[in-house]
Amino acid sequence: MKIPGWIVPLMIVAFTLAGLGGAELFAIPSVIVDYPEDRADRGGEMRTVTLLVEGVKCVDTARSAARTLEGEEGVIRFTAYASRNRVEVLFDAGKTTVQGIVEALEGPVFEKETGEFHFGLYRVVEIDGAGISE
Amino acid sequence: MKRFRVGFQLAVLAAVLATGFRFAMGWSRTSIETYCPFGGLESALSLFTQQRFTCATGERNLALFLALLGLTLVTRKSFCGWVCPVGAVSEWFAALGRKLFPKTRREGDGAPLHALEPTRRVDRLLRWLRLPVLAAILYFTFRTGELIFRGFDPYYVLFSFHGHDVFAWSYAVVGAVLLGVVLFPMAWCRYLCPLGVSLWPFSAVGRLRLVRNEGTCTGCGACDRACPQAILVSRKPEVRSGECTLCFECTEVCPEKDALTLRFRGLRP
């Protein structure tokens, strides 16, 4: 069967769109951290907040971001999707707030290897899909 | 078709440059690496063994790589000839090389060669270089969990606007590659490109093929001289080579009407 040449760029566009569309259909977490269970009240109100965090871009930075929440009461689980700069935090709404989580994430990060604190590594730019103005 | 293809390549190049510039200026969180299908292949081993992506790659790289395999099964290595910005830049540098060294020569069997182009036999041997390059990149990327070769990657070095991990020696290496392309046509694509070699087996069984009509073909060899991948089109009933990028350079220069046509080959041999 004879085929016109323009079919080639048409196929390229079709497959590219399929690839870009297909990428939105699945997400593989880069890091999942479960904090000690006694941080939450039994029967407390559990909430999940989805944050877009500048600075979370690979497994290492996601792990480091998870460490910033280690001292935050009520935080139960931290899940990062580094390729999308996305972080999901499950927390006990009776013990902490979204604002508390954002402040902890944007706070100083202690690096065990060097014993130094790093500031401004992470910046939350969206909370549950809503952008944060400067 | 040639003008249309160059327009297509320029459009892709402009999109890549815009993405790279926006990321470098801090206006966007999407880097050019997000759209590189090779990142999907680099992450494949990590995904199988550790259920995680290699640093700086993600779902988009994997989905684009799978889509690229599908595309290659139909339209051969059309990605290389139409989309890949490094392929486009290589073509333009190779054209510059042909202008600088316009003399051609012939092999013993009469096949045409550009001035410094290696003979077909050496060319076939050199193409195997791509396999150790691919193996080294996949192995060390898996071991380190990082895209540690990005500083040597022409795509990243040329279009990231001095991105992370790009140093003076990165420009030296990529400069050497581009000089190589001027001297030896399409040297990067033919002898070093790891994505190109990983697509090769899929391209070899690709269904769209250029078929030569032996009734109308006069055997002038214009197609052989035009092919950027050094395929001897005039000596085959149809182009089955896994290196064919469906760039249509051969049909463009063919003086006979319908001597070369694009055809869909069914699954029967």
Image (cartoon, rainbow, N blue to C red):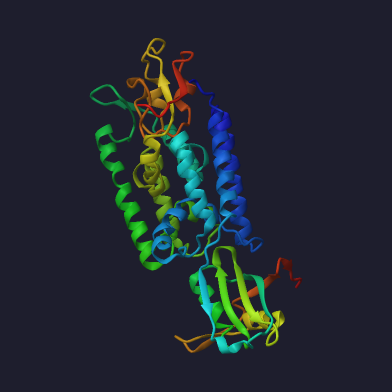
Residue B199 showing in the rendered view = yes
Residue A87, relative to residue A95: is it above or below?
Answer: above
Q: Is residue B195 above or below residue B59?
A: above
Q: In the rendering, at what x and y percent does residue A74 appear?
A: 63, 86
| Residue occupying image coordinates x 47% and y 41% | B70
Q: Residue furthest top?
A: B215
Quarter that holds the N terminus of chain B: top right
Q: Quadrant of residue B107?
A: top left
Q: Report x, y in % for residue B40.
A: 46, 54
Rendering coords of residue B92 (x, y %): 48, 38
Residue B269 occupies quadrant? top left
The residue lying at 66 percent from left, 85 percent from top is: A43
- Label total for image: 0
Is the residue A23 above or below the residue A104 in the image?
Answer: above
Q: Is residue B145 left or right of residue A45?
A: left
Extreme residue toward the left, this view: B108
Please state which of residues B141 and B222 is positioned toward the viewer in this rendering.
B141
Task: Residue at 53%, 57% (x, y): give it.
Answer: B59
Q: Is residue B263 left or right of residue B115?
A: right
Note whether residue B87 is visible.
no
Q: Residue at x 59, y 35 (%)?
A: B7
Of residues B48 and B25, the one nearer the viewer is B48
Between B261 and B150, the one nearer to me in the picture: B261
Q: Is residue B110 left or right of residue B24?
A: left
| Image coords of residue B249 (percent x, y) | 47, 27
Q: Residue furthest right?
A: A133
